[in-house]
Image (cartoon, grey):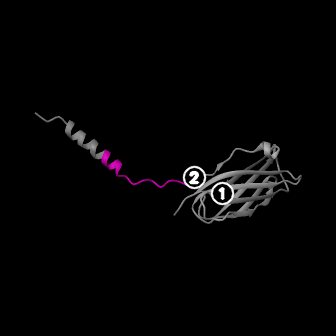
Amino acid sequence: MPRPPLPKLLLGVALLATLAACRRAEPQPATPPQPSPPAAAAGGGVRARLELARDPIVGSVPLSVYLLDGAEGVEGARVTVTAAASGAGTAPIASRATEAGPGLYRIPDFAFPAAGDWILTTRAKLPDDRSHASETRVTVPGP
């Protein structure tokens, strides 16, 4: 009379569970930027949205700032983006954006000098002297 397959089945399940537990961890993708809520009250209806052209890396990353007043793109503003590392030891980095169209401002080579958690502060001075500031958090992965 043949033996029941239960012991072999249990051995196979245990082997599969062991192999699954020993599997190499997958590399984690970079954390995408997390924009803070728009500060409409502080900017009188002005909103800014910062976007990185690709996942953040140590080195240059193109970025864009979309600046709106209501539904209209703001022209003629002075826009700067300042990056400050959340930990101590790295000086803040500021770059001025160039206007690329109504409500669109770009920095083609924004540089992250090190991996870590960064706070990007977007500041805009509008032609009518109103100001706006907002923050975006970005994690730059290490090598």
Q: CA distance from mark 1 to mark 2?
A: 14 Å
Pointer 1 residue: 53
In the image, which residues are magenta? Answer: 17-30
Number of marks in picture: 2
Confirm whether the magenta stretch covers residue 25.
yes
Residue drawn at the location 60% of the way across and 65% of the way down = 89
Q: Residues within 10 Å of mark 1 (few under 14, many from 20)?
A: few
Dividing the picture into quadrants, the one containing residue 100 is: bottom right
Residue at x 78%, y 43% (from the top left corner)? 40
Please indicate whether residue 125 sits to the left or right of residue 7 in the image.
Answer: right
Residue 12 falls left or right of residue 108: left
Query: In the visual, does 27 lie left or right of 115?
Result: left
Q: Please state, as top left, top right, bottom left or bottom right, where the N terminus lies in the image.
A: top left
**Amino acid type at mark 2:** Thr
Residue closest to the far left:
1
Residue in the picture at 68% in, 53% down: 51
| In this view, 7 is above or below 30 | above
Rendered residue at 76%/61% (across/down):
97
Q: Is residue 34 magenta?
A: no
Q: Nearer the viewer, residue 84 or 7?
A: 84
What percent of the width, then of the height, locates residue 54? 62, 57
- Pointer 1 with pointer 2, Cβ within 8 A: no
Task: Please name the residue that numbered disc 2 is placed on.
Answer: 31
Q: Which of the marked residues, 1 or 2, is nearer the chain's N terminus? A: 2
Q: Farthest residue toward the front?
A: 88
Query: For this rendering, which residue is in front, 96 or 100?
Result: 96
Dot 1: what SS?
loop
Amino acid at the residue labelled 1: Ala
Give the secondary structure at mark 2: loop
The nearer-to-camera label among 1 and 2 is 2
Q: Position of residue 5 (x, y in %)?
A: 20, 37
